[in-house]
Amino acid sequence: MPKKAAKAVQAPYVMTPSRIREGLPFPLGATWDGLGVNFAIFSANAAKVELCLFDTNGKTELERIELPEYTNEIWHGYLPDAHPGQVYAYRVYGLYDPEAGHRFNHNKLLIDPYAKQLVGELRWSEALFGYTIGHRDADLSFDERDSSPYVPKCKVIDPAFTWGRDHPVQIPWDHTIIYETHVRGYTMLHPAVAKEVRGTFAGMKTPEVIDYLRKLGISSIEFLPIHAFVQDQHLLEKGMSNYWGYNSIAFFAPNPLYLASGRIAEFKEMVAYLHNANLEVLLDVVYNHTAEGNEMGPTLSMRGIDNASYYRLMQDNHRYYVNDTGTGNTLDMTHPRVVQMVTDSLRYWAEEMHVDGFRFDLATILGREYDGFDERHGFLVACQQDPVLAKIKLIAEPWDCGPGGYQVGRFPPGWAEWNDQYRDTIRAFWKGDSDKLADFGRRLTGSADLFDERGRKPFSSVNFITAHDGFTMNDLVSYDHKHNEANDEANRDGTDNNLSWNHGEEGPTDDPEILALRLRQMRNFFATLLFSQGTPMIVAGDEFARTQRGNNNAYCQDSDIGWVNWEFGHNGEFLMMFVRKLIRLRQRFPMLRRGRFLVGAYNEELGVKDVTWLAPSAEEMTVEQWQDGNNRCLGMLLDGRAQPTGIRRTGSDATLLLIVNAHHEELIFVLPEVPQGMHWNRLIDTCNPTARPERYEFNSEFVVNARSLLLFELVKDED
C-alpha cells in the first residue's frame, strides 16, 4: 500500500511562523526562562514538527507553528511571548510505513514525552488510532481523522517553589522500613481527610495521616505509580479503571486525578510535609512500556513522534513490537535518547520534586540488551555514575516476562531488589510446608546466597511477604484460592501460586479458634519480616488486617476493594499495636539490621559466632536436622559481641535469641547457657502478644506454642 505523509488539514487556527525563533536543542521539553518558552523534541526520522497551541482548557486549537530548527535530531524553537499556563501539543510529519517501523501521522495530536503537566483526560475514539479500525489492511491503513478533541494536552509550568528548609531525608538503608501504598486508595475512606481532597496529594498532607505514619514507625512511603497514565478502554466500558496506574504516558507529569488543586506545587507540598515528619518519599516508576500498546494500539505520543527510535521492534518485521512486558510494547532502552529521557525524568523527580528514591517496575527490561540482561547496560551505568541518581534509593523489581527475565541478585552494586524468594519461603514455612527450614534460615539472614558478593549489603534484599500485587496479609491467612470475580475476567486473572492457607474456612468466619490462629499467623509473618536481615516492606493496611475480600489482583478496583478501609475494629487495633512494637524493637537493636551478612563465622579473638543455629536441645543444629524435611523449629542466637564496630557506633550490641516453631504442636525449647550474672528476657511471643517482658534463666525448659515466634534479649541481673 502507499506510504503516506499526510495532506494538510483545514482547522480554525492561524499559522504565524514569524513569531518563532530558533531557540535551543536543550533542555528537551517546554522550558520557560522568564522571557519566553523554548520548545525542544527529539525525533530522528520526522520530516517536520508542528507546535500546536491551545486555549487554557485545551479545547480549541489556536495556532500551529512549525519548529524552525533541527539540531542533532532535536526539533526546536523559541516563543518569546509564551509563558507558564500555555497549553500545547505536537503534530509530527513523516513516513507512514509500519513494516519499516515508521508510524508518522500528523492527523494525530501528540503528547510531549517531556510534558510536566497534562490538561484534560483521554477520551476514547477511533480517531486516536493511526490506522482505520476495521480496514482490511488493519494497522497498515492510514487514518485521516483529527484526534485533537480526544487527547490530553500539555501545559507549560513555572517550576518555582519555595522549599524553605526541605532537603532529602536520606534515611540510612539499615533504618529503612518501606510502606507501600496508593496515593488515592490510602485516603479515599480516611475519616479525617476532607472529602474534597480525598485520593489526592493534598489528602496525604492531612495531619492525622502523617501522625499515623510517624507513630507506626515506618521510614519511607512508596507510592504506586503517580505518573500520568491512561485508563484502558475495555476497563472503562466495564465501569472499572486502571486503578494501579501501570500504564504511563508521560514520565514527567503527575496524574491529573491526584491534583486536587490542579497545581504541580501540590505534589511538592506533600513531599515537604512528609519530609518534615522525617519520612522519605519513594515512587514506583514504569519506564518499561507506555500506554500505546502493540501495533493495534492508539497513537498518543512516542509512536507518532518516532516509533522506530522509542520502541523495541521485531528484527524480522518492524511492524510488530517486542513484548517483554506483557502489555504490548517495550521501550528501547538501548537507544541513547530513550535512556536520556528516563534518566532526565528520574533527575527531574529527584531534583525538582525532592523525591528520595524509586522502585522500578519490571526492571530487567531497563538492563536488557538485544542479547540479554547486562549489568553494564547504558541505563544501569548511567545510574551508577550520575551524581544525583547514585545518591538516592534505587530498587529493582528484577524480573519480567522476556527471555532471561528473572534476575534476582544480579543487579549491580548500589541497587536493592525485591526478593520474591523471601516472600515464597516465608509463606511456605509458616503454612507448614516440608523441606523449608534451611531456606528459611537463608532468608532470615539476608539471602546471602543471592546478594553476598561485590560488597553488597543485606539491605540489598527488599524483604516482603505481601505487595500490592497479590493477597493482603489478612487474605493470605483467610483464603486458599483467589476470588477475583469482581474483575470480570472469570477469575482467570491473578496468580494461582499464592502459598496461602485459610486455616479451616474460606474467607470470613465467626469461628473463634480460626480467627485466633489467623491473627497469630499474621503476627508470625510480621515478626519474621521485621526481625529478618534486609530491608522490610509492608503494604499499607496490612498492619490492621485490611482485606480485599480474596481479590489478589485489584489493579482495576478503584473501589472499596482496592481502597484502605480505616474502620478496622478491635482485632485490627491490636495487630497494629503489635506491629508498632515490632518496628520499635527492630530500630532498637542493630543486630536485627546489620550492615554485614550473618554467615556463622567464628571470631577467634572474641570466641563468638555472629549467628548460631540451635536445636530445641540448645545444641547447635546438625546437618541431619537441617535436612530433616519434617523439622519446622529452630533457634537463632545473635551474639552482640560479633557486631562489627564502625563510624556510627562502637562497642557490642545486645545478644538476641529468636525461636520459631511452625509445627502444629507445641514443643520444649531449652534456653541456651548465658554468662554469669545474666538472664534471658522475653520480649515477643506471637502466641501471647500482650505479654509483658519476663525473666527466664538459662537451661529453662520453655514451652514454645504451636505456630509461634519468640524473641529474647540477654540482660544483666539486677544488683
Image: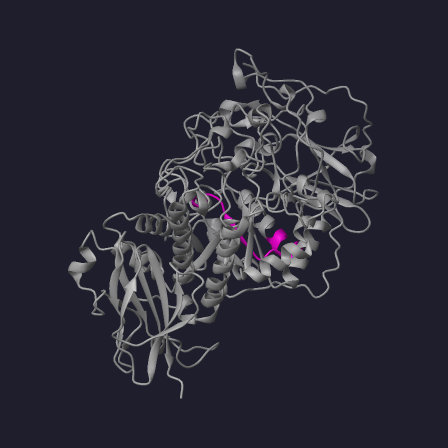
**Residue in the picture at 51% in, 28% down:** 101
Quick check: 18 above or below 175?
A: above
Relative to 496, is 2 on the left or the right? right
Quick check: 13 above or below 136?
A: below
Residue 354 within the magenta-colored segment of the rendering = yes
Front residue of this view, candidates 522 and 374: 522
Front residue of this view, candidates 86 and 194: 194
Residue 361 within the magenta-colored segment of the rendering = yes
Q: Which residues are magenta?
A: 347-364
Front residue of this view, candidates 461 and 321: 461
The residue most toward the left is 624
The residue most toward the top is 136
- Could you say where residue 129 lies in the image, as x and y percent from the top left? 60, 22
The answer to whether residue 580 is seen in the rendering is yes
Q: How many marks?
A: 0
Front residue of this view, candidates 590 and 338: 590
The quadrant of the image that shows the N terminus is top right
The quadrant of the image that shows the C terminus is bottom left
- Could you say where residue 409 lies in the image, as x and y percent from the top left? 36, 53
By what rule are the colours in the image chosen?
A: one colour
Relative to 302, is 397 on the left or the right? left
The answer to whether residue 75 is seen in the rendering is no
Which image quarter: residue 678?
Answer: bottom left
Relative to 120, is 298 on the left or the right? left
- Could you say where residue 87 lies in the image, as x and y percent from the top left? 76, 37
- Could you say where residue 560 lies in the image, as x and y percent from the top left? 57, 38
Which image quarter: residue 557?
Answer: top right
